[in-house]
Amino acid sequence: MKVIGIDIGGANTKLASSDGGIIELHYIPLWKDTRLPTALKEVADRLKPDKLGVAMTGELADCFLDKEEGIRFIMNAVERAFDCEIKYVNNKGDFNTHVDDIQNLAAANWAASANFIGSEIGDCVFVDVGSTTSDIIPVIDGKHIAGHTDFSRLLRSELVYAGTLRTNIATMLDSVKVSGGTCRLSSEQFATTADAYLLLGDITQQIYTCETADGAGNTKIDAARRLGRVVCADLTGISKKDITSIAKQVKDKQVGLLCTAISEVAGRHGLRTIVSAGIGEFLIKDAAKRLGFDLISVSEKWGSEISKVFPAYATARILETEYDDLS
């Protein structure tokens, strides 16, 4: 039986099979791209799953009037594409049993990941740093005990709205230190975190899947040019050393943000172990080291490719287990 999990986000749609043999990531920014129904139909025709588990966060995209409209759009796209049995993950990390109760499907991908980690590893703070956001989820006795909405998780430091690729550097730093002194940043979206981490060698061009801030390429020279622009300079007006320093300051700031949130969540529940996932695992590793916490890496346990699409994989595994239990 082929069991597939799919995680439909605002920027990326990820999918994985329960055996880890199928792993895919598709950049489909919902706020500007209408390809989701077509892309899902292509996936359905090509993979032909027997069972499909769906988690979503894309309902928050501002092309929708509200979350319910987004949820219904995503559900409609899924159900028109796939003719197999479909189950949706809710914010408890379970599969929804009430067809009419769809509000609890909003922003639920992290819940699947956290509950799967709870069953496989145990008590921990599960931290997933993706392209856009960072989830910091307390897991106790096999289940997550986080807030059930993005709003409640933001209030509890269980969600940090900063990621590895798409975050505008000007939202993270007010100023940077360069050879000429302390320099304020322009508030334009001239560069994103992807530029900093590409330049530092933390990610590759293959991982840099999102659009660039200026629509240009994603080479290191392109990234350096964009990073120089955040202080209103170009490559003839700022040194390579200063540009690299800006990138390092971005990383230091983001690790610091993670440390603050992890410390707050862990302290509230008496936890000292982090389980890391996502394309930003390198940031979580630095945060764990800075905090002195134990670290278990999803990449090391299940592989780096699964780590990149972990909510989809977790959804598939939970669905497979549910059917195994029934049989």
Image (tube, rainbow, N blue to C red):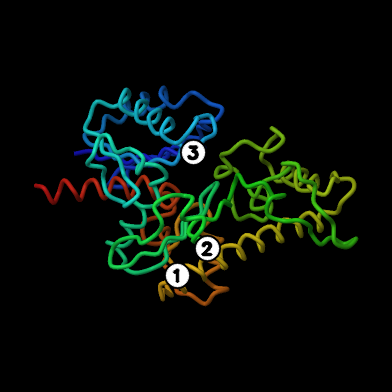
Which element is circle 2 on? helix
The earlier-in-sequence mark between 1 and 3 is 3
Marks 3 and 2 close (CB-CB < 8 Å) = no
Q: Residue at x 76, y 48 (%)?
A: 227
Name the residue nearer the viewer: 22 or 28: 28
Position of residue 2 measured from the top left corner of the image (x, y, whole percent): 23, 38
Position of residue 261 measured from the top left corner of the image (x, y, whole percent): 54, 65
* Rendered image: mark on residue 284: 2
Name the residue nearer the viewer: 23 or 4: 4
Q: Residue at x 71, y 44 (%)?
A: 191
Indicate whether 146 appears above or below 166.
below
What is the distance, in whole Å, between disc 2 and disc 1 at their CAs? Answer: 9 Å
Q: Give amino acid for label 1.
A: Leu
The earlier-in-sequence mark between 2 and 1 is 2
Q: Give amino acid for label 2.
A: Ile
Which element is circle 3 on? helix
What is the distance, in whole Å, between disc 3 and disc 2 at their CAs? Answer: 25 Å
Q: Residue at x 18, y 39 (%)?
A: 1
* Rendered image: mark on residue 295: 1
Reading the image, the residue beneath label 3 is 60
